Each structure stands twice: as structure tokens, then as C-alpha cells.
Image (cartoon, rainbow, N blue to C red):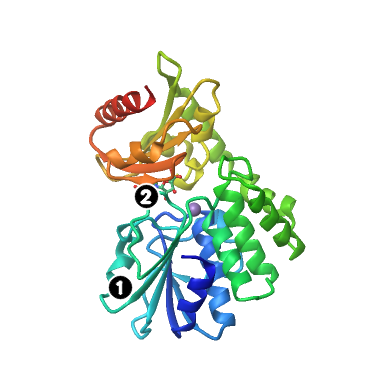
Amino acid sequence: MNADKIRTAIKKFDRFLVSAHINPEGDSIGSQIAAASLLRRLGKEVVIVNESAVPHLLRFMKGTEDILKEMPANFKFQAAIVLDCPDLTRLGKISECIGKDTTVINIDHHISNEKFGKYNWVDTKSSSVGEMVFELFKAFRLKIKYDEAVAMYVAIMTDTGSFKYVNTSSSTHKIAADLIDSGVEPYDMYGKIYETSSLQDTSLLGEALQTLRVSDDGKIAWLWVTKEMLKKTKASLEGTEGIINFARSIEGVEIAIFFRETGTEGRVKVSFRSKGRVDVNKLASFFKGGGHTTASGCTVFGKMSEVEKKVLKQAQVMVK
Ligand code: 5GP
Ligand code: MN
């Protein structure tokens, strides 16, 4: 499957739902806005509906104001475009809106993607769904407008950690260059995404770093954000984004693990990052999560100490 085949599929329908995974980030939101804009330019009717709200940090992007949290009752769509989502359960309650007669167009780059659509365009070599949506614009021969370029640039920039993760390729840079030619200013985008931390979020980082531990062999580093820390610093859960990179950046560390108490009792959100040798998608899959080879996540139920023990034990097995 490729952009041309998705183009042929899109042409068959008039009314679309566009959705992406729960707790969306730059790639899912940016890709959604750009894809919805493309569809509207083709004269299609589109609603974008996500279970979770758009993170505050991303609301500067034009089009985020159109993203709904509930399916409009009177909108009957024929096809659902699901973006950046490895399986339908990751859509949360929006998956309930997708019936047997809905055609699902699955556009994703997760290695754990379950190919749940009628059309499955899954490119695990692509840095981001943002890159794939860019290819779709090319397939339709549409000239990219400024707001679309911003959305795709943000998608690519955030999923590549600002063009530095292992998923960054020459085509990533070529696409970024094209988006810059459409008016995007890299310095402006970087500032909006990476230089807008609140004092509270930075205090939270300080608290989290106090919990940083490294295994005896130096290969696993982990840290925590607890409910208490969130309360003490008045930081937001959104402010925890990026903290895991401090664990990953330690020399010799192969797996970084970030534990977060999400607010629901007995529920811990676990994020994994790898420098490449260890496949953390497999590690997350062990706990019924998923993601990419170098970035993945899952939710583990239990007391904090138990969750930490269980996860570290499995990480030790994988790192050998
Ligand atoms: P993060 O650690 O930033 O939340 O997520 C890293 C990657 O893992 C993302 O691609 C995200 O979609 C995926 N991921 C995170 N949590 C889960 C989960 O609970 N289940 C699945 N299947 N994927 C997850
Ligand atoms: Mn992505």
C-alpha cells in the first residue's frame, strides 16, 4: 500500500471521520489537521474526533479548534481515516463509532500496527505520520498551504525529537525543507514546542530527576513522576513530556523507563525508550502495550513498588 492507493481509496467517499490515538501528541494532531484540510480541499465533508483534548502546547496550530471530543449525532460518515494508531482500542471510545459498514483507512508508522483497516498503509520506516500525509499531498498534486505545512512540520519535528532520533532520514529533511519553502519557520516552531515550559513543569523535572536510578550494569535507567510530585509542583501531566530523555541520555544506558502515576488509583503509565539495540516495542508488548522499536509505552496495574519491580525484571531480561 502506498500514497497513490490511499488516494484512490479516498476518491471513493464523500464523508469522513478522522481520528487518532488517545493522549495525542504532535504527530497525531498535526497529521489530523493536515489530512482533514486535504480532504476539505477535495470537497469532502470531514469531522475530526478524538477521545482526548488537544494538549495546550499544540493549540497554536490552526485547525486544532475544529477537533471535537464527541461524534456529532447527525453526521453519517462512510469512511474513517485512523492516523498514528497501532490498533483500534487505542482510539478509546471513538472506536465505538466505527461500525461494521465503515471503511477504515489506516495510515500509520507503528511497528505494532495490527492492520485493522480495509486499507492499511503502514510504513514503519517513516519517521512520522506527518511524513506520510505529506506524501498524500504529493499524490493529489496539491500545493501545500502555510497552515498545512505548520501541522506537518510539527508532526515530523515532534516524532523525530527535533530531527535527532534514529527515525530521521534524508527524506525527513527533504520534506522539512519543502515545508520550510511553504513558509514554516523552524525557529518559530522550535520555540513554540520546546521553549514554552512553565516554571511548574521545570520544577517537576527537578523532582523527577531526584528519583533517577541506574541498574548495576549501567544499562537501564528509570525515573518516576508521582501524584504527590504533580500536586507539590502544580505541574500538569502534559508537562512530563520529554523527562524520559534525561534517563536515555546517560552514557551506557540502553533502556530508559519512565513511570507516571496517572491519577487513577493503582494505574501506572510506563514509557520506554531505547538507543536502538533493544527493541522496546517487544518490552511494551509484554505488558500489552506497543509502539516503536525505540519508543513505546504501556499501562501497568498495581502498587508503585510492584509495578517498578515487574517492569525492571522484564527490562533486565531484554537488555541481556
Ligand atoms: P509515550 O511513551 O510517549 O507515551 O509513547 C511512545 C510510543 O508508544 C508512541 O508511539 C505511543 O503511541 C506508543 N504507546 C504509548 N503507550 C502505549 C500503550 O499503552 N499501548 C500502545 N499500543 N502503544 C503505546
Ligand atoms: Mn507518530
Kind of residue at disc 2:
Ser
Q: Nearer the viewer, residue 72 or 127?
A: 127
Q: In the rendered image, which quarter is residue 178 located in?
A: bottom right
Label 2 crowding class (10 Å Cα cut-off): few <14, some 14-19, many 20+? many
Label 1 crowding class (10 Å Cα cut-off): few <14, some 14-19, many 20+? few
Number of numbered discs on residues: 2
Find out whether the residues at labels 1 and 2 contact each other: C-beta distance under 8 Å.
no
List the residue tagged with mark 2: 112
The answer to whether any part of residue 269 appears in the image is no
Q: Position of residue 101 (x, y in %)?
A: 28, 79
Is the distance from the Cβ of mark 2 to the nearest ligand 1 atom less than 8 Å? yes
| Residue lying at the far top of the rendered structure | 216
List the residue tagged with mark 1: 97
Q: Position of residue 88 (x, y in %)?
A: 32, 61
Q: Report the side of 186 relative to 154 (left or right).
A: right
In this rendering, the label closer to the viewer, 1 or 2? 2
Identify the residue at image location x=43%, y=28%. Answer: 223
Identify the residue at image location x=54%, y=53%. Answer: 126
The answer to whether any part of residue 171 appears in the image is yes
Q: Report the side of 222 relative to 178 (left or right).
A: left
Question: Does 20 appear above or below 142?
Answer: above
Q: Secondary structure at mark 1?
A: helix
Q: Secondary structure at mark 2?
A: loop
Kind of residue at disc 1:
Cys
Q: Position of residue 68 (x, y in %)?
A: 44, 71
Q: In the rendered image, which quarter is residue 58 located in?
A: bottom right
Identify the residue at image location x=34%, y=23%. Answer: 316
The quadrant in which the C terminus is found is: top left
